[in-house]
Image: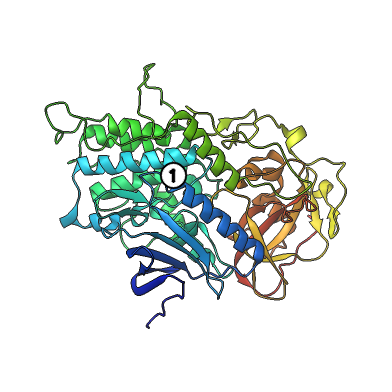
Amino acid sequence: MAIEPPQIPGLTDWRPLARGGFAVVWEARQATLDRLVAVKVDQRRLDVESERLRFLREAGAAGQMSAHPGIVTVHDAGILADDRPYIVMELCPGGSLTRYLAAADRPSEERVREIGVRIADALAATHARGVLHRDVKPANILVDAYDRVGLADFGLAALPGPDTSRAEAFEGVTPAYTAPEALLRRPPTPAGDVYSLAATLYALLAGRPPRWPAGPTPGLADVVAAQREPLAPLPDVDPGLMAVLGEALDLDPAARPTAAGLRDRLAALPLSGDTPDGDEPSAVVAQADTGTEPDSGRRRTRALVLPLVGLVLVALLVAGLLLVDRGPGTAAPAATPPPVGSSAAPEPTTDGSSTPPGADPSPSPTTAGPTRGAALPAGYDDCSAELGGTSYCPTEPECWAGIISVFDLPSLGTPRDCDETHVYQTFAAGPLDVEVRRQSQLEELRAVRQICDADVLDRRLTDADRETDWEVLALPPQEADGSDRVYRCLFGRGDRDAPVELTAG
């Protein structure tokens, strides 16, 4: 079926380049500068004003990050008249790294190292600013006219729509390149991006992702089971390169290097194809100032992409875009940008969880969790005695058409009448007395983990609905003016047109 090009002022000569389940990518000519650009049009509509504002804010942040040489440049963004979001990007005529997966086009080890250093440096720069990509894979690494690679698709790749089924969401995260902990619905971390990049580099060498089951497309259970298997070494690949990739593909996120560490290990790796005169390999590119990875007590020096003052200013600008104040009367202390020299890795806390970069690690369960003295919100009963902690249960069914989750900013839900088609339903809630500036901050709070839990959900379900394949997630307060201080625990499994019966717990 023919598809119609979008109507965007200043762009002409439309030609479709690629089409997927959620988006169409076009080539177009930007008339004012007489240059070709790529335009990605997402097929999912943003018909709620808060969703539209959030997308534009995220696109602005993506534009700021694209100043890095390892990130595809974003020229413009907007929302079409029919509510579909779009991004105008640098046109990369070399296509994506999927071209290297064919046996006849397999890249050299030196080329794989070069790609790994450049993209790891891009991830290190974004992680230092508290931003995760969450969908690193060959299709999202593009090749420009000068054969240089760049990371693309920040934001749009993690944009679920109201009609997204569980199976579609499974496909959307590209499980072949997704870290095992992400498939188990654990909060995303920088270590997940490191795993995905290492899986991409492995696939470039092997022609297939690591630990990927053979045969037809597997189900989620098969993928999770396969990821527990040992990593199969590639006999024709340099052992040093395999060792670096094996460390980054460790099943334990804490055992993986940071993105900066992976970059440094790859850049320092000697390969048989290197020039014998000791010249630096082409893999060594300008590097983001994200800290030096310790290596047996030694320190490596590295070049700075920007002078110190310029780097701090850029970090502050991006932080302002990502961590914008939630509204008048609710201003929280500004999050301090990661210090120069920081790898921005999560910091351990006393309860074994981790604190996202830029978050205040000091709150404990007595200060970061809900308090029993909080006023009971309208529409909820206190069910702390049944569910534990300080927990609320909705007095009437509360449903949501879908959840917008872009980068690591707090998720945004689209309310929907429970008798209309919806995806999620609230099964519990609780008070929140700290300012949540990132989704991972919310999900790491001990009180939230205690209530937004599959076992708690089971206690609220009837026998007919218990122990089925429900997705459970936490939703932060939804009102920007600070009037909503309640987090919600949602569950869902595809489209429904009637609420699920909940018990008292």
User: Along the horizontal axis of the image, is 63 left or right of 118?
Assistant: right
Image coordinates for residue 18, horizontal then vertical, percent: 35, 68
Write down the quadrant of residue 460 in the picture: bottom right
Image coordinates for residue 304, horizontal then vertical, percent: 39, 30
At 64% from the left edge and 28% from the top edge, which residue is drawn? Answer: 350
Look at the picture and state if 297 lies above or below 383.
above
Image coordinates for residue 454, horizontal then vertical, percent: 65, 52
Q: Secondary structure at mark 1?
A: helix
Circle 1 sits on which residue?
193
**Quadrant of the frame with the N terminus:** bottom left
Question: Is residue 500 visible in this depiction of the protein?
Answer: yes
Question: Is residue 228 visible in this depiction of the protein?
Answer: no
Q: Residue furthest left?
A: 276
Q: Residues within 10 Å of mark 1 (few under 14, many from 20)?
A: many
Write down the quadrant of residue 440 in the picture: top right
At 45% from the left edge and 75% from the top edge, which residue is drawn? Answer: 6
How many marks the image carries: the answer is 1
Comparing 143 with 418, the one in front is: 143
Image coordinates for residue 84, horizontal then vertical, percent: 53, 70
Q: Residue furthest front?
A: 32
Q: Residue furthest top?
A: 297
At 72% from the left edge and 75% from the top edge, which residue is drawn? Answer: 419
**Quadrant of the frame with the C terminus:** bottom right
Look at the picture and state if 347 lies above or below 227.
above
Comparing 262 with 45, the one in front is: 45
Look at the picture and state if 292 lies above or below 181.
above
Amino acid on which disc 1 is placed: Asp
Comparing 286 with 154, the one in front is: 286
Comparing 499 with 437, the one in front is: 437
